[in-house]
Image (tube, coloured by chain):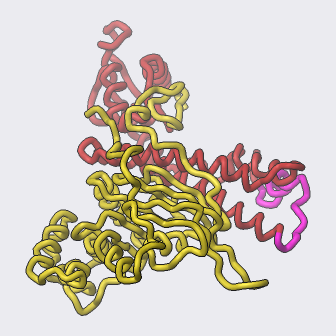
Chain colours: A red, B yellow
Amino acid sequence: MSVRHALLALLSEGPKYGLQLREEFEARTGEVWPLNVGQVYQTLQRLERDGLVESDDDADEGPQKGFRITEDGTAELASWLRTPPDLASPPRDELVMKVLVAVRMPGTDVHDVIQVHRRYLVELMQQWTRIKEDEAEFDVSLALVVDAELFRLDAVIRWLDSADGRLKRAAADEQPLLPAASLPRLRRRVGVRR
Amino acid sequence: MNGAGPTTGKGKAVAVLEMRSVSKTYGTGAAQVHALRGVDLSVPAGTMVAVMGPSGSGKSTLLTIAGSLEDPTSGDVLIGGMELARMSRNGKARLRRRTVGYVFQDFNLLPGLTAAENVALPLELDGMSARRARAASLQTLDELGLAERAAQFPDQLSGGERQRVAIARALVGQHRLLLADEPSGALDSVNAEEVMRLLHNACKRGVAAVVVTHDAQLASWADRVVFLRDGLVVDQTAPAAGPESLLSAGPGGRLPGAPRMGPGQ
């Protein structure tokens, strides 16, 4: 999540004060992403340095200092919206590592390890779903943020389910496990940059 | 606004559904399959329990036994405190009609009947007059936001509406136990959420529900999620935390697992 571009987006609606920017940012993300004042000012300073926003020169530093977006800032925002986030390189997924380790560790039942994580993730999803219950307080921005989180967790659970099934089938077929160096091999095979 | 959550009669009241060391074995000898192996499950009024597990884990068997459509090989099933094994066939059939509502993946609505007639049917089969059954049916349809669709036939309804009619049929009258097998079937996620919201609201009004699913998003509506593997309950979620726990700040976040941001990322 880019605080820089979120602030530019708020400023694209008109000039605003620092404190106001922080409040509006939190309100629009359903208060799921808290932001501290320091982060806001630090980011604004960098935006100003890069010529993407301007401030009232004569005003004191602090909550009353006003900011507005520049032409360059508007162009930067437009290009950011259409730039896909980096989803191409697989992240180093801790959970994948744990399951890979559990498969080879003597005396460890990988299915038990998978279940520990599955339960934790479902509990987390239950907590997110609780937010949906109160329809009256469930606005569209909050709904979008909560759904994104639920789909992300759901994807991890689906992976665990498929790993569970795949390992069970492999054990039934007495298939040998992959060689230990499977991740670096994968990296070479799909040509992923580090 | 105190966010106490669904506490309706939890703990004290007799569970609407109680399964005690329920086992089910199909076939004999080498072909024997243990579909369920000593399953304990207690579902109090006002509670939704989701049962998750891979295909062949015994989910559907658990549901058919809970609904008295099949007898367990061993163990006890009690609905509203009544032991099914001690009831006559007719008694069980009556219990099924009066107390238990089913929601299936493929809706199972009768195509020749309107929405209102489909919902009224279980009441009429139970001997209620057509007029009273219709009134009860219309009331339930209204509660589920389907008042305007009452006169439509199933093929005139959208998938989401059909499933809502099926839920109305499962809830109509005095049904206190709702058994659902993959209730959102092939619905899209918005309609699936609507289905779960309706089931959840029914539970808030005191119905007990068991929802069998492999979909974590559906299961996450439940108060408790039970994990079934090879006919055994291997795990379950801790009692669901109330909404207030979500708002207590973890490190750098108001919600658990909320992504954290660095400055100028």
Q: Which residue occupies the foreground of this view, A46 or B40?
A: B40
* Residue that sits furthest to the left in the current view: B131
| Left or right: where B36 falls relative to B109 | right
Magenta run includes residue A189: yes
Q: Which residue occupies the foreground of this view, A122 or B99?
A: B99
Q: Is residue A14 depicted above or below B112 in this figure? A: above
Q: Which residue occupies the foreground of this view, B184 or B60?
A: B60
Q: Name the residue rendered at 87%, 52% in the picture.
A: A104
Q: Position of residue B263 (x, y in %)?
A: 52, 26
Q: Position of residue B208 (x, y in %)?
A: 37, 58
Magenta run includes residue B100: no
Asked if residue B21 can be seen in this view, the reply is: yes
* Residue that sits furthest to the bottom in the current view: B112
Q: Is residue B200 depicted above or below B94 in this figure? A: above
Q: Position of residue B193 (x, y in %)?
A: 37, 60
Q: Position of residue B79 (x, y in %)?
A: 40, 65
Q: Is residue A36 depicted above or below B90 in this figure? A: above
In the image, the segment drawn in magenta is A172-191
Q: Quadrant of the N terminus of chain B?
A: top left
| Left or right: where B204 falls relative to B28 | left
Q: Name the residue rendered at 59%, 45% in the picture.
A: A120
Q: Name the residue rendered at 57%, 47% in the picture.
A: A121
Indicate the quadrant where residue A7 lies. Answer: top left
| Left or right: where B5 falls relative to B225 | left
| Left or right: where B151 falls relative to A127 | left
Asked if residue B263 can be seen in this view, the reply is: no
Q: Quadrant of the C terminus of chain B?
A: top right
Q: State the count of labels.
A: 0
Q: Which residue occupies the foreground of this view, A58 or B111?
A: B111
Q: Name the residue rendered at 38%, 44% in the picture.
A: B12
